[in-house]
Amino acid sequence: MIGEAIHEDVLRALIGQHAVRECLVARIDGGPDWGLSIRLGSSGARWVPVRSRRETLRTWASLTAVGRFADSVGLRGFGVAL
């Protein structure tokens, strides 16, 4: 899931431009933390994870926390992989 990742501020801009096609939340490497990935409108089937300014991968401790983040950046929904 890690590789090329998108910064949170770029994610906000893409959401504002309606360029985000899908969002998926999944556990990171089967552990307790959750990560958020997006698909862009023109990028095909590739999932791009969200990163923070300091970390290569942004993680959240709960789905509730991911939901609060999604709401704060303007995402209206996401899928969850269990």
Image: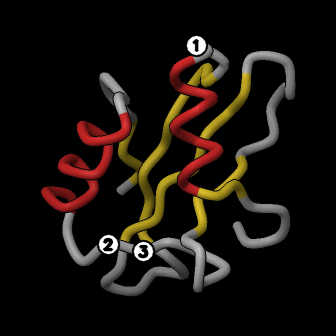
Give the crowd class for mark 3: few <14, some 14-19, many >=20 residues within 10 Å.
many
Q: Quadrant of the C terminus?
A: bottom left
Q: Which residue is mark 1?
A: 18
**What separation in Å lies between label 3 and label 1 (alpha carbons)?**
23 Å
- Residue 43's quadrant in the figure? top right
Image x and y of residue 26, in percent? 44, 59
Amino acid carrying label 3: it is Thr
Q: Is residue 66 above or below residue 45?
A: below
Image x and y of residue 31, in percent? 40, 86
Front in this rendered view, residue 12 or 38: 12
**What separation in Å lies between label 2 and label 1 (alpha carbons)?**
24 Å
Indicate left or right for 67 with 51 as reference: left
Q: Nearer the viewer, mark 3 or mark 1?
A: 1
Amino acid carrying label 1: it is His
Which of disc 1 and disc 2 is earlier in sequence? 1
Q: Which residue is mark 2?
A: 60
Residue drawn at x 61%, y 40% as measured from the top left:
38
Indicate left or right for 72 with 23 as reference: left
Specify the label residue 59 is tagged with: 3
Residue drawn at x 35%, y 29% as measured from the top left:
74
The kind of secondary structure element at disc 1 is loop
Q: Is residue 13 above or below residue 26?
A: above
- Are the residues at dot 2 and dot 3 in contact (C-beta closer than 8 Å)? yes
Indicate left or right for 14 with 45 as reference: left
The kind of secondary structure element at disc 3 is loop
Image x and y of residue 66, in percent? 28, 56
Image x and y of residue 40, in percent? 72, 27
Indicate left or right for 18 with 76 as reference: right
Give the crowd class for mark 2: few <14, some 14-19, many >=20 residues within 10 Å.
some
Q: Is residue 40 above or below residue 34?
A: above
The kind of secondary structure element at disc 2 is loop
Q: Nearer the viewer, mark 2 or mark 1?
A: 1
